Image: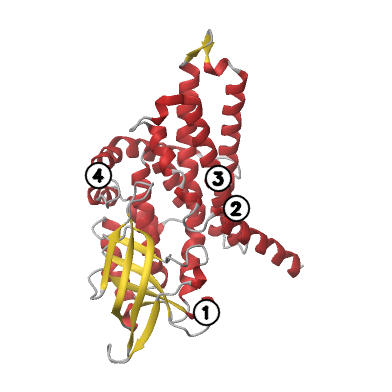
Amino acid sequence: MTGFALGVDEEEWCGRLRALSAQRLRPLAEKGEPGRVNRPLLAALGEEGLLERVFVSGALELCLLRESLAYGCTEAETALALQGLGAHPVLRAGSAAQRERWLPGVREGRLVAAFALSEPGAGSDAAALALAAERDGGIGPDGGWRLTGEKRWISNAPEADFYTVFARTGENPGAGGITAFLVPADRPGLTGEALDMLSPHPIGSLSFDGVPVGPEDVLGEPGRGFRVAMDTLNLFRPSVGAFAVGMARAALDATLAHTAGRGAFGGVLADLQAVAHRVAEMATRTEAARLLVYAAAGAYDSGSAEVPRRAAMAKLLATETAQYVVDHAVQLHGAVALQRGHLLEHLYREVRAPRIYEGASEVQRTIIAKELYREVAAR
């Protein structure tokens, strides 16, 4: 890959992924129930080796994977991404025993993972989370904790088989007093319920009523869980942008086909300057977002210190662009795009959530500004 275009092998791989997502994965997605984990779809992702790719790929390959799947089947893309998000902390910070116990099942699509960070009072401000981990010397030979509180807006909850849970252990104030735990779904005191959301993928809440966890459940080190969360988000933020780019490209291609063939005012829609200019704007913004996503992924893969800023820029621009492109695609299609089952009706529901999760657009702007001024101070 150059700074501006993919190589031939990469283009061919992306083409195969788009075809796979449309031909094999989309039919499985259509058989699933909105708001529920689609285990046959996860199994297919495992059989195709795509879940394995999430854990062995660099950031750029992950972006290409998510973009290509999103183009043909957003449900498949989301199912894959949620497995990666929930299990990446185990891969990077888990013990050998934790990795051996949980990751093979995630890779095969047998076990469902979830990333449990957000709370009713701590969404964008992740450092303000309040789920309490209180010391309990009666758990295990080295003592443990009891988790008490609530998580909300957790993807794959309450159907996941295990959760990466971030709780306040209190070693230090703010972000310094958070610990990451791997909590199996069958732990006593852990319950959950599904939430009825606009986006079609599963989201729920979790209640922790003195859920026992021990030292063997800690991911990384006590008091350093916020770093585990940020390490995961820095990898996945550019690929959220890639998901958005995939949706934007699908909406753009549908719009090109529609406006080139739809008769209007003695010609076709594409003959109208207002339409042609709008399509040009959609295409230009999509291309700009794509390039920024690839640049952020490249920064991550090279170990650049600019990753937080570039990842935030990529997620911000790509998700805002996808919203713009899908909205204008609906407008240019007219009423047909509002029918249930139409591609754009589906994308219109899907495209809104990425501007909020894994750091809302306002949070990304804050990160970008802080990084810019930090660089000024360093100079």
Labels 2, 3: front one: 3
Q: Circle 3 is placed at which residue position?
A: 320
Spatial separation of the CA atoms under disc 2 and disc 3: 11 Å
Which residue bears the numbered disc 4?
A: 32
- What is the three-letter code of the residue carrying label 4? Gly
Query: Are dots 2 and 3 in contact, CB under 8 Å?
Result: no
Residue 320 in the image: x percent, y percent?
A: 55, 45
Answer with the quarter of the image where residue 321 lies.
top right
Residue at 28% across, 88% down? 139
| In this view, 369 is above or below 33 | below
Neighbour class for label 1 at 10 Å: few (<14), some, many (≥20)?
Answer: some
What percent of the width, then of the height, locates residue 225?
Answer: 45, 75
Which of labels 4 and 2 is toward the front?
A: 4
Question: Which label is found at residue 176?
Answer: 1
Residue 6 visible in the current orientation:
no
Q: Position of residue 6 (x, y in %)?
A: 53, 41
Q: Of marks 2 and 3, which one's residue comes earlier in the chain?
A: 2
- Residue 161 pos. (x, y %): 26, 64
Dot 4 falls on a residue whose secondary structure is loop
Checking the image for residue 205, the label placed there is: none
Q: Nearer the viewer, residue 261 or 302?
A: 261
Q: Earlier in the sequence, mark 4 or mark 3?
A: 4
Kindly indicate whether the residue at mark 1 contacts the one at mark 3 (C-beta within 8 angstroms): no
Instruction: Classify 10 Å Cα crowding around label 4: few (below 14), some (14-19), many (20 and above).
Output: some
Q: Earlier in the sequence, mark 1 or mark 4?
A: 4
Tell me the quadrant of the picture where the C terminus can be found.
bottom right
Tell me how many marks there are: 4
Q: Residue furthest right?
A: 379
